[in-house]
Image (spheres, rainbow, N blue to C red):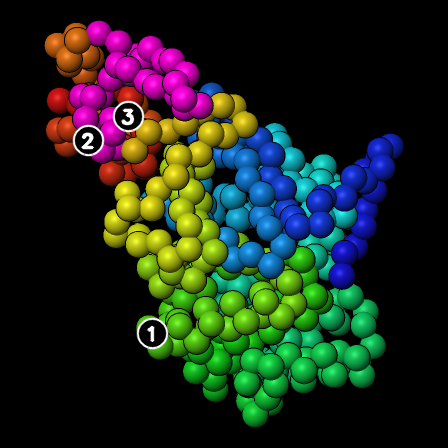
Amino acid sequence: MVNSVKNNNSELQPLPENLSNQIMDVYHVYGMKLQNKVVALKGVSFDIKKGEILGIVGPSGSGKSTLLLALGGMLKPTAGRIIYPDGTDISKLPEEKMYTFRRNNIGYVFQEHNLINHLSAEKNIEMPMKLNFIPQSERKKKSNELMKRLEINHRKNHTPSKLSGGEIQRVAIARALANEPQLILADEPTGNLDAEKSLQILELFKDLSDEMGTSYLICSHDPIVAEYSDRSLEINDGIIIREHGLGIDLMDLDSSRLLVMDNQNRITLPEDAVEEVAGAFLYTWKVKDKGIFLEPLGSETTIDTQKIKFCPNCNLEIPPRTYSCPRCGAKLSRIVR
Protein backbone atom coordinates (compact mmCIF):
# COMPACT_ATOMS: atom_id res chain seq x y z
CA MET A 1 0.00 0.00 0.00
CA VAL A 2 1.56 3.32 -1.08
CA ASN A 3 -0.04 6.51 0.12
CA SER A 4 0.89 9.01 -2.59
CA VAL A 5 1.50 12.59 -1.56
CA LYS A 6 2.36 15.09 -4.27
CA ASN A 7 5.09 17.63 -3.70
CA ASN A 8 3.87 21.21 -3.98
CA ASN A 9 4.01 21.97 -7.72
CA SER A 10 5.91 19.03 -9.17
CA GLU A 11 4.72 15.64 -10.35
CA LEU A 12 6.10 12.62 -8.58
CA GLN A 13 8.68 10.56 -10.46
CA PRO A 14 8.37 6.91 -9.38
CA LEU A 15 11.54 4.97 -8.68
CA PRO A 16 12.63 2.16 -11.03
CA GLU A 17 10.68 -1.04 -10.46
CA ASN A 18 13.57 -2.81 -8.73
CA LEU A 19 14.09 -0.13 -6.06
CA SER A 20 12.31 0.31 -2.76
CA ASN A 21 14.07 3.49 -1.66
CA GLN A 22 16.69 5.96 -2.79
CA ILE A 23 18.69 7.99 -0.28
CA MET A 24 20.56 10.92 -1.82
CA ASP A 25 23.11 13.24 -0.17
CA VAL A 26 21.49 13.16 3.28
CA TYR A 27 23.02 15.38 5.95
CA HIS A 28 21.87 15.90 9.51
CA VAL A 29 23.23 18.42 12.00
CA TYR A 30 22.34 18.37 15.70
CA GLY A 31 22.60 21.61 17.67
CA MET A 32 22.04 25.22 16.65
CA LYS A 33 25.05 26.96 18.18
CA LEU A 34 28.34 26.68 16.34
CA GLN A 35 30.24 25.21 19.27
CA ASN A 36 27.53 22.60 19.96
CA LYS A 37 26.93 21.40 16.42
CA VAL A 38 27.37 17.70 15.66
CA VAL A 39 27.22 16.58 12.02
CA ALA A 40 25.75 13.08 12.40
CA LEU A 41 25.26 12.35 8.67
CA LYS A 42 27.60 13.72 6.00
CA GLY A 43 26.14 13.25 2.54
CA VAL A 44 24.88 9.67 2.86
CA SER A 45 23.69 8.10 -0.42
CA PHE A 46 22.55 4.55 -1.26
CA ASP A 47 19.67 2.56 -2.75
CA ILE A 48 17.53 -0.12 -1.13
CA LYS A 49 16.38 -2.81 -3.54
CA LYS A 50 12.87 -4.20 -3.50
CA GLY A 51 12.67 -7.30 -1.32
CA GLU A 52 16.22 -6.81 -0.04
CA ILE A 53 17.49 -7.28 3.51
CA LEU A 54 20.07 -4.53 3.89
CA GLY A 55 22.27 -4.34 6.97
CA ILE A 56 23.81 -1.20 8.44
CA VAL A 57 26.92 -1.81 10.55
CA GLY A 58 29.22 0.59 12.36
CA PRO A 59 30.48 1.65 15.79
CA SER A 60 28.41 3.54 18.36
CA GLY A 61 28.08 7.19 17.37
CA SER A 62 28.65 6.44 13.67
CA GLY A 63 25.21 7.73 12.56
CA LYS A 64 23.20 4.48 12.38
CA SER A 65 20.32 5.61 14.63
CA THR A 66 20.10 9.04 12.99
CA LEU A 67 19.94 7.37 9.57
CA LEU A 68 17.16 5.03 10.71
CA LEU A 69 15.14 7.92 12.17
CA ALA A 70 15.51 9.92 8.97
CA LEU A 71 14.42 7.02 6.73
CA GLY A 72 11.43 6.43 8.99
CA GLY A 73 10.27 10.03 8.80
CA MET A 74 10.76 10.54 12.54
CA LEU A 75 13.53 13.06 11.98
CA LYS A 76 13.72 15.59 9.16
CA PRO A 77 17.25 15.67 7.73
CA THR A 78 19.05 18.98 7.44
CA ALA A 79 19.60 18.37 3.72
CA GLY A 80 19.18 15.65 1.10
CA ARG A 81 16.41 13.47 -0.31
CA ILE A 82 14.75 10.24 0.90
CA ILE A 83 12.57 8.87 -1.87
CA TYR A 84 9.94 6.10 -1.70
CA PRO A 85 8.65 3.96 -4.64
CA ASP A 86 5.92 6.36 -5.82
CA GLY A 87 8.45 9.20 -5.92
CA THR A 88 7.52 10.83 -2.62
CA ASP A 89 10.48 12.62 -1.03
CA ILE A 90 9.67 12.38 2.67
CA SER A 91 12.31 14.97 3.57
CA LYS A 92 10.02 17.57 1.97
CA LEU A 93 6.73 16.46 3.53
CA PRO A 94 5.08 18.68 6.17
CA GLU A 95 4.53 16.91 9.50
CA GLU A 96 0.78 16.36 9.07
CA LYS A 97 1.35 14.57 5.73
CA MET A 98 4.39 12.74 7.06
CA TYR A 99 2.28 11.19 9.82
CA THR A 100 -0.11 9.69 7.27
CA PHE A 101 2.62 8.57 4.89
CA ARG A 102 4.64 6.95 7.67
CA ARG A 103 1.64 5.01 8.94
CA ASN A 104 0.92 3.57 5.48
CA ASN A 105 4.37 2.89 4.10
CA ILE A 106 6.84 2.23 6.90
CA GLY A 107 6.95 -0.48 9.57
CA TYR A 108 9.14 -0.53 12.68
CA VAL A 109 10.68 -3.37 14.69
CA PHE A 110 12.91 -2.24 17.54
CA GLN A 111 14.87 -3.90 20.31
CA GLU A 112 12.41 -2.41 22.78
CA HIS A 113 9.23 -3.73 21.17
CA ASN A 114 7.01 -0.80 22.29
CA LEU A 115 3.88 -2.94 22.43
CA ILE A 116 0.94 -1.56 24.40
CA ASN A 117 1.09 -3.52 27.64
CA HIS A 118 -2.62 -3.62 28.47
CA LEU A 119 -3.66 -4.81 24.99
CA SER A 120 -3.66 -8.41 23.78
CA ALA A 121 -1.34 -9.54 20.99
CA GLU A 122 -4.27 -9.39 18.56
CA LYS A 123 -5.23 -5.83 19.56
CA ASN A 124 -1.61 -4.67 19.32
CA ILE A 125 -1.41 -5.97 15.75
CA GLU A 126 -4.71 -4.31 14.89
CA MET A 127 -3.66 -0.89 16.21
CA PRO A 128 -1.96 0.44 13.01
CA MET A 129 -5.01 -0.60 10.99
CA LYS A 130 -7.33 1.03 13.51
CA LEU A 131 -5.43 4.29 13.11
CA ASN A 132 -6.08 3.97 9.37
CA PHE A 133 -9.82 3.59 10.02
CA ILE A 134 -9.91 0.07 8.56
CA PRO A 135 -13.20 -1.67 9.52
CA GLN A 136 -13.01 -4.05 12.47
CA SER A 137 -13.87 -7.14 10.43
CA GLU A 138 -10.97 -6.45 8.05
CA ARG A 139 -8.60 -5.72 10.93
CA LYS A 140 -9.47 -9.00 12.61
CA LYS A 141 -9.05 -10.96 9.40
CA LYS A 142 -5.67 -9.40 8.64
CA SER A 143 -4.33 -9.80 12.19
CA ASN A 144 -5.37 -13.47 12.25
CA GLU A 145 -3.63 -14.06 8.90
CA LEU A 146 -0.45 -12.50 10.23
CA MET A 147 -0.57 -14.37 13.54
CA LYS A 148 -1.02 -17.68 11.73
CA ARG A 149 1.86 -16.87 9.40
CA LEU A 150 4.08 -15.95 12.34
CA GLU A 151 2.88 -18.97 14.36
CA ILE A 152 1.50 -16.98 17.30
CA ASN A 153 -2.24 -17.36 16.68
CA HIS A 154 -2.57 -19.50 19.81
CA ARG A 155 -1.29 -16.53 21.86
CA LYS A 156 -3.54 -13.86 20.39
CA ASN A 157 -5.43 -13.17 23.63
CA HIS A 158 -2.30 -12.81 25.78
CA THR A 159 -0.86 -9.44 26.81
CA PRO A 160 2.90 -8.81 26.31
CA SER A 161 3.69 -9.68 29.94
CA LYS A 162 2.44 -13.23 29.29
CA LEU A 163 4.52 -13.75 26.13
CA SER A 164 8.09 -14.98 25.71
CA GLY A 165 10.77 -12.73 24.18
CA GLY A 166 10.48 -14.45 20.81
CA GLU A 167 6.68 -14.23 20.84
CA ILE A 168 6.82 -10.53 21.70
CA GLN A 169 9.14 -9.91 18.75
CA ARG A 170 6.81 -11.84 16.44
CA VAL A 171 3.89 -9.68 17.57
CA ALA A 172 6.00 -6.59 16.88
CA ILE A 173 6.80 -7.91 13.38
CA ALA A 174 3.12 -8.67 12.70
CA ARG A 175 2.19 -5.16 13.84
CA ALA A 176 4.88 -3.69 11.54
CA LEU A 177 3.44 -5.66 8.58
CA ALA A 178 -0.22 -4.86 9.31
CA ASN A 179 -0.53 -1.95 6.85
CA GLU A 180 1.58 -3.69 4.16
CA PRO A 181 4.49 -1.22 4.25
CA GLN A 182 7.12 -0.81 1.55
CA LEU A 183 9.94 -0.81 4.09
CA ILE A 184 10.54 -2.36 7.52
CA LEU A 185 13.10 -0.59 9.72
CA ALA A 186 14.63 -2.78 12.42
CA ASP A 187 16.96 -1.48 15.14
CA GLU A 188 18.74 -4.32 17.00
CA PRO A 189 15.75 -6.66 16.43
CA THR A 190 17.56 -9.62 18.03
CA GLY A 191 19.16 -7.65 20.86
CA ASN A 192 17.04 -9.19 23.62
CA LEU A 193 16.86 -12.72 22.17
CA ASP A 194 19.03 -15.80 22.58
CA ALA A 195 20.83 -17.32 19.59
CA GLU A 196 18.05 -19.81 18.71
CA LYS A 197 15.27 -17.21 18.79
CA SER A 198 17.46 -14.76 16.85
CA LEU A 199 17.87 -17.32 14.08
CA GLN A 200 14.11 -17.92 13.99
CA ILE A 201 13.39 -14.19 13.65
CA LEU A 202 15.96 -13.74 10.89
CA GLU A 203 14.67 -16.79 9.00
CA LEU A 204 11.24 -15.22 9.29
CA PHE A 205 12.51 -11.89 7.89
CA LYS A 206 14.00 -13.78 4.95
CA ASP A 207 10.79 -15.72 4.24
CA LEU A 208 8.58 -12.63 4.54
CA SER A 209 10.89 -10.65 2.28
CA ASP A 210 10.65 -13.38 -0.38
CA GLU A 211 6.88 -13.77 -0.02
CA MET A 212 5.78 -10.13 0.23
CA GLY A 213 8.55 -8.23 -1.54
CA THR A 214 8.98 -6.07 1.56
CA SER A 215 12.43 -4.50 2.05
CA TYR A 216 14.20 -4.58 5.41
CA LEU A 217 16.83 -2.19 6.72
CA ILE A 218 18.45 -3.65 9.84
CA CYS A 219 20.88 -1.88 12.17
CA SER A 220 22.62 -4.36 14.45
CA HIS A 221 25.86 -5.35 16.15
CA ASP A 222 24.76 -9.01 16.08
CA PRO A 223 27.03 -11.13 13.81
CA ILE A 224 24.07 -13.39 13.04
CA VAL A 225 22.16 -10.46 11.51
CA ALA A 226 25.07 -9.70 9.19
CA GLU A 227 25.06 -13.30 7.97
CA TYR A 228 21.40 -12.98 6.94
CA SER A 229 21.66 -9.61 5.17
CA ASP A 230 21.82 -9.66 1.38
CA ARG A 231 24.44 -6.95 1.70
CA SER A 232 25.64 -4.60 4.43
CA LEU A 233 26.76 -0.98 4.38
CA GLU A 234 29.48 0.11 6.78
CA ILE A 235 28.98 3.59 8.23
CA ASN A 236 31.57 5.54 10.18
CA ASP A 237 31.61 9.18 11.28
CA GLY A 238 28.39 9.84 9.32
CA ILE A 239 29.70 8.51 5.99
CA ILE A 240 28.97 5.24 4.16
CA ILE A 241 32.52 4.04 3.66
CA ARG A 242 32.28 0.40 2.55
CA GLU A 243 29.89 -2.26 1.28
CA HIS A 244 29.89 -5.98 2.11
CA GLY A 245 28.18 -8.88 0.39
CA LEU A 246 26.10 -11.73 1.79
CA GLY A 247 27.30 -13.45 4.96
CA ILE A 248 29.91 -10.98 6.22
CA ASP A 249 31.99 -11.61 9.32
CA LEU A 250 31.72 -8.62 11.67
CA MET A 251 34.88 -9.77 13.41
CA ASP A 252 36.83 -9.70 10.12
CA LEU A 253 35.39 -6.93 7.97
CA ASP A 254 38.60 -6.67 5.93
CA SER A 255 37.83 -10.03 4.32
CA SER A 256 34.74 -8.76 2.48
CA ARG A 257 35.17 -5.00 2.12
CA LEU A 258 34.32 -3.19 -1.11
CA LEU A 259 35.27 0.49 -1.12
CA VAL A 260 32.39 2.90 -1.84
CA MET A 261 32.66 6.10 -3.87
CA ASP A 262 29.79 8.31 -2.73
CA ASN A 263 27.98 11.17 -4.49
CA GLN A 264 30.73 13.58 -3.40
CA ASN A 265 33.36 11.31 -5.02
CA ARG A 266 34.77 10.39 -1.59
CA ILE A 267 36.52 7.08 -0.93
CA THR A 268 37.55 6.15 2.63
CA LEU A 269 40.56 3.87 2.77
CA PRO A 270 40.63 0.96 5.28
CA GLU A 271 42.77 1.51 8.38
CA ASP A 272 45.23 -1.23 7.43
CA ALA A 273 45.86 0.49 4.09
CA VAL A 274 46.42 3.85 5.82
CA GLU A 275 48.79 2.19 8.28
CA GLU A 276 50.82 0.70 5.42
CA VAL A 277 51.55 4.23 4.12
CA ALA A 278 52.21 5.57 7.65
CA GLY A 279 49.15 7.82 7.73
CA ALA A 280 49.92 9.78 4.55
CA PHE A 281 47.32 12.41 3.71
CA LEU A 282 48.56 13.78 0.36
CA TYR A 283 48.63 11.55 -2.75
CA THR A 284 49.34 11.75 -6.44
CA TRP A 285 47.04 9.72 -8.69
CA LYS A 286 46.97 8.18 -12.15
CA VAL A 287 44.32 6.24 -14.08
CA LYS A 288 45.75 2.85 -15.05
CA ASP A 289 43.94 -0.01 -16.81
CA LYS A 290 40.52 1.36 -15.82
CA GLY A 291 41.64 1.76 -12.20
CA ILE A 292 43.07 4.55 -10.08
CA PHE A 293 46.63 4.30 -8.74
CA LEU A 294 47.34 6.36 -5.60
CA GLU A 295 50.85 7.12 -4.39
CA PRO A 296 51.70 8.93 -1.12
CA LEU A 297 53.29 12.31 -1.71
CA GLY A 298 56.54 12.95 0.15
CA SER A 299 58.80 10.70 2.14
CA GLU A 300 57.80 8.76 5.24
CA THR A 301 59.96 11.11 7.30
CA THR A 302 58.00 14.12 6.06
CA ILE A 303 54.71 12.35 6.67
CA ASP A 304 55.73 11.29 10.16
CA THR A 305 56.12 14.92 11.25
CA GLN A 306 52.38 15.38 10.84
CA LYS A 307 51.19 14.16 14.22
CA ILE A 308 48.09 14.50 16.35
CA LYS A 309 47.61 13.25 19.87
CA PHE A 310 43.94 14.01 20.58
CA CYS A 311 40.81 13.34 18.53
CA PRO A 312 39.78 16.63 16.85
CA ASN A 313 36.12 15.63 17.24
CA CYS A 314 35.81 14.52 20.91
CA ASN A 315 39.30 15.30 22.30
CA LEU A 316 40.00 11.72 23.44
CA GLU A 317 43.70 10.84 23.71
CA ILE A 318 44.43 8.44 20.87
CA PRO A 319 46.61 5.31 21.23
CA PRO A 320 49.70 5.12 18.98
CA ARG A 321 49.23 4.15 15.33
CA THR A 322 45.45 4.38 15.49
CA TYR A 323 43.51 5.93 12.63
CA SER A 324 39.97 6.13 13.97
CA CYS A 325 38.82 7.37 17.37
CA PRO A 326 37.86 4.50 19.73
CA ARG A 327 35.17 6.72 21.33
CA CYS A 328 33.39 8.55 18.49
CA GLY A 329 34.64 6.69 15.39
CA ALA A 330 36.04 9.83 13.72
CA LYS A 331 38.58 9.06 10.99
CA LEU A 332 42.05 10.45 11.71
CA SER A 333 43.94 11.48 8.60
CA ARG A 334 47.42 11.82 10.10
CA ILE A 335 49.71 9.43 11.91
CA VAL A 336 49.14 9.47 15.66
CA ARG A 337 51.89 9.75 18.31
Res. 194 mark: 1
As drawn, the residue found furthest toward the bottom would be 154
Q: Quadrant of the C terminus?
A: top left
x, y percent for residue 184: 59, 59
On whether residue 124 falls in the magenta region, the answer is: no
Measured from the top left, where is residue 280 in percent x and y?
Answer: 24, 17
Which residue sits at x=75%, y=72%?
130
* Residue toward you, 114 or 135: 135
Marks 1 and 3: in contact by CB < 8 Å? no
Magenta stretch holds residue 283: yes
Secondary structure, mark 1, is: loop
User: In the rendering, which numbered label is found on residue 40?
Assistant: none
For marks 3 and 2, give the CA distance: 8 Å
**CA neighbours of label 2 inside 10 A, class few (<14), some (14 to 19), many (20+):** some
Q: Is residue 93 above or below residue 319?
A: below
Residue underneath mark 2? 322
Tell me which corner region of the image, top left, top right, bottom left or bottom right, holds residue 307: top left
At label 3, counting other C-alpha atoms closer than 10 Å, the crowd grade (few under 14, some 14-19, many 20 or more) is many
Query: Answer yes or no: do the residues labelled 3 and 2 have beta carbons within 8 Å?
Result: yes
Badge number at residue 332: 3
Secondary structure found at label 2: loop
Instruction: Specify whether 59 is left or right of 163.
Output: left
The amino acid on which the numbered mark 2 sits, given as a three-letter code, is Thr
Give the left or right position of residue 66, taking residue 269 as reference.
right
**Residue type pointed to by label 1:** Asp
